[in-house]
Amino acid sequence: MSQTEDDPAAVGEPAVHAAEPRPAPVELLREALSRVSRAAPLEARGRFLVLTHRGPDPDALGACEGLRQLLSEAFDHEPVVATVGVIHRAENLALVEQLDLELEDYLTLEHDRFAGVLLVDTQPEFGHTVVPDDLPIVAVFDHHVPPGGGGDQPSSVPVEYRDVRLELGATSSLIWEYMRDAGLEPSARTASALFCGVRYDTADLSRNATPLDEEAYLATFRLADRAAIARIAHPPLPPVYYAELSGALACARRHGPLILALMGKVENPASVAEMADLFLRMEGCSWTLVGAEHEGGYVLSLRTDPAYGRAYPLMQRVLDGEGSFGGHGHIAGGRIPLEDAGESSVRAVERRLRTRALELLGASSEDGIPEEGRALHE
Ligand SMILES: [Mn+2]
C-alpha cells in the first residue's frame, strides 16, 4: 500500500487501531479538567465552578453535589457550586436546608477565581441557564433534548466534554456512574441529594427509568440520611401555596383528556409545576398545561400521562415559536418573556396558548372538543 499524506504513518504518527478501547467516561472527564486547568492562570488552576439551570430541582442539586464530591475527592480539585435566582418549590428548599448544601450566589462570584465551568441537568444553549462568557465550559452533563431536537448539527457553544444521554431518567444517575467508576462512595449528604434527584425525576423509578437509574436509586438509598429524605418529601408549605391552589382549582378547565389551567399571575412560580403534577393525577386526564405570569415572564408546565406520549413535542407546538422551553420524557417547562406584564397582555398570551392547545386536541379527536371546557368537579 502506498502512503498518502492522510496516512498517519506517513507523518510519523502512531497508527490508531480500530479495536483500541475508548477510555472510560470518568477518565475523559479527568483529562478534560486537567487540560483546562493547565491552560488557566496559576491562581485559578484546579478551581472549578459547578452550575445548573435557574430554579434548580432535586435532580439538578443532586448532580451538583455528586460533582462536588467527585471533583474534590477523586480529582483533587476545588469545586464551588453556585446557583442563580431564588429557589421557590418547597421540596427543593427543604433539600437545601435539610442537607445543609453550600450554594454560592452566582451573581456575586468573581469569575477569575476559576479555571472553568461544569454544567449539570441543562445545556449552555438553554434559555433558563446562565453561563459566564469569560470562562471555558469544561463539561456538560444532561438528559434533556438539545436545542433543535438533538439532530447532528454541532452546538454553537464550545464544550470540552459533553455527556448528554436522552434515555436517562435523571442527571443524578449519570453523575452516580462517574462516582462509581472512580471508586468513590458518596457521603450521606451526597447520597441523599443524588437519591432525591433520581426519585423526583423518575417518580420513584416509575417513569423514564433505565437500569442505570435503578442502580443509582438503590445504591444511593442505602447510603442516604433517611430521616432527611423523609422531611424533604413532606416539607412545610407557605400560606401562598394554598391561595394559589385555590386559584388553580377555580380556573382549571377540562377539555376531554386535557386539563388546562391558565392562572393569570402567581406569587410563587413553583405553583405552576405543582398544579401540573396535581392535575395529571385526575382520572381521565392524559395531559395538562398550567401557566401563570411571574416577574415579567409567562411560566408554563406541561405533563403527559406515560400512555399518552412525550411532553417536549406538545410544548413545542403549544408555544409555536414563542419563548424558550425544555423537557424530557413526560415533563416539559417553558417561559415566554413579556415586555408588558399587565393584565391585558397576560390575557392575550393565555388566549393564544389556549387556542393552540385546543387545536392540538382537535387534531387528535373525532368529535371535536368543546371550546369552553368544563370545571373540574362537573
Ligand atoms: Mn433532570
Image (cartoon, grey):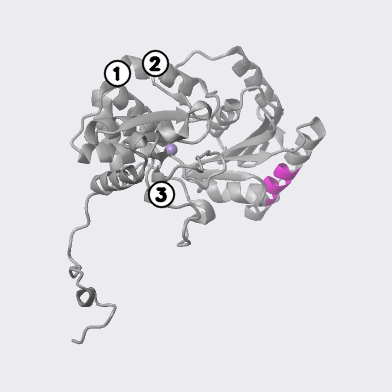
Q: Which amino acid does label 1 sit on?
A: Asp
Q: If you read the primary sequence from the N terminus, does the residue marked by circle 3 or circle 1 appear first?
A: 3
Question: 338 or 28: which is nearer to us?
Answer: 28
- Give the percent coordinates (x, y) of residue 301: 58, 37
Q: Reading the chain from its start, which is encountered first: label 3 or label 2?
A: 2
| Crowd class of label 1 (few under 14; some 14 to 19; many from 20; radius 10 Å) | many
The residue carrying mark 3 is 166
Dot 1 beta carbon under 8 Å from ligand 1: no
| Quadrant containing ligand 1 | top left
- Residue 253 visible? The answer is no
Q: Which of marks 2 and 1 is nearer the N terminus?
A: 2
In the picture, residue 374 is in which quadrant?
Answer: top right
Q: What residue type is labelled 3?
A: Leu
What range is drawn magenta here? 352-359
Residue 311, how many percent across, how many down? 53, 45
With 133 as the anchor, is 269 left or right in this view? right
Give the residue number, with chain letter if any, for mark 1: 225
Q: Distance between the residues labelled 2 and 1?
A: 10 Å
Which residue position holds label 2?
A: 98
